[in-house]
Amino acid sequence: MKKLINQPEDFVLESLSGMAAAYPDLLKVNFDPTFVYRADAPVTGKVAVISGGGSGHEPMHAGFVGMGMLDAACPGEVFTSPTPDQMLAAAKQIDGGAGVLYIVKNYSGDVMNFEMAAELAHAEGIRVSSILIDDDVAVKDSLYTQGRRGVGTTVLAEKICGAAAAAGYDLPQVADLCRRVNLNGRSLGMALTSCTVPAKGSPTFSLGDREMEIGIGIHGEPGRERMPLKSVDEITEILTITIIKDSPYSRTVREWDEAQGEWVDVKLVNSEIKSGDRVLAFVNGMGGTPLAELYIVYRKLAEICQKHGLQIVRNLIGNYITSLEMQGCSITLLKVDDEMLRLWDAPIKTASLCWGI
């Protein structure tokens, strides 16, 4: 294992310390329990937006803390869910009186711990809502999930909902918007190589020099198919066509009912992607993929979308949801309306995304 680290057990805290030193005007880091929050938090009268998950996916989520996006992020150890005490402490730190929205990727540990945190926050008198992101079309059930995994749409939801909160939306409105973003987003990824978790010191899985895996999870969870290595155009076509042809996905999820103070079952169904739709196209690198290669992916993605009557009206290209040093990429297509576009374009200033300032 070759990594720019000192001791594996210090990896997360030293990384966060460096981030705090680099961006003192944007964010602060609390270390016991660990969470990252806006330097100007709490913002009185504004809904606070929190997300989180295992470290190793940077810049998600801490890199998105700041004006117009997240108010706080809760990082766990590498590929390990944060704990409820982190999430509760973050909520107490950033609550400006208008309530807190938890945006939760659909992984069993994240779901369980964010649910506990929501109950604890409610008991503390904090208004709370929690929305699940489950946009990965690769597999229905996986190593760490029941149902589809939460991946690329998470970043898009954090930006759009963060902008809505900054614009004065109330808690039910931000939660409804987040749910709608999730229902209109689909993602699929692939890997060329594995990654190495510092504490383990060896690759999470193995791929031959001429192999690739379609549908790999961001923690190295098995995908839908392992196959011989193909050209970037062929890979992009596999990912994009699978997303476009994905049928409506029906499932029942648990959401926190603020009025009743309890969890309720909510049935959700994704809408189809069809010709004439406007989309935000997100090409994401897994950490070890050069930007030049991601542009080659986007070139083919744009061609395929045009062929299928999809209008790309916004895009995001880069390494934003990584798996340490894994080589590979993911594609996310989000069907957008005028409201989502307006909120996507709204000003943002974080360590990893900044425009309109």
Image (cartoon, helix red, strand yellow):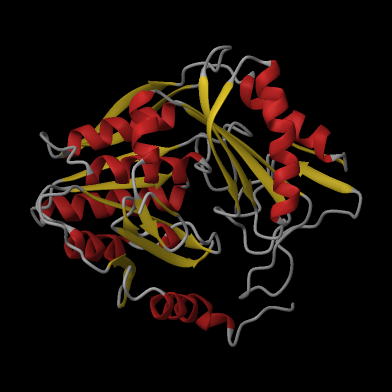
Q: Is residue 12 left or right of residue 175?
A: right
Q: Eyeballing the image, is 111 above or below 287?
A: above
Q: Is residue 356 above or below residue 79?
A: above
Q: Is residue 81 visible?
A: no
Question: Can residue 168 be seen from the camera position used here?
Answer: yes
249 to 41, vertically: above or below: above
Image coordinates of residue 331 in percent, x first then y, are 63, 38
Residue 239: x and y in percent read 70, 32
Task: Quarter of the image for the C terminus: give it.
Answer: bottom left
Quarter-of-image position of residue 209:
bottom right
Q: Quadrant of the N terminus?
A: bottom right
Q: Position of residue 98 (x, y in %)?
A: 12, 47
Q: Quadrant of residue 309?
A: top right
Q: Residue furthest bottom?
A: 6
- Image position of 310 (left or right of 119): right
Q: Nearer the viewer, residue 173 or 260?
A: 173
Give how far across and how far down residue 90 sits, in percent.
25, 63
Left or right: where 80 falls relative to 30:
right
The residue that appears at 70% across and 47% down in the rendered structure is 294
Report the front residue among 156 and 101: 156
What residue is at 61 percent from the left and 82 percent from the top? 5
Q: Is residue 352 left or right of residue 192?
A: left
Residue lying furthest front: 357
Residue at 87% from the left image edge and 47% from the top image edge: 211
Q: How many marks?
A: 0
Residue in the picture at 35% in, 22% down: 267
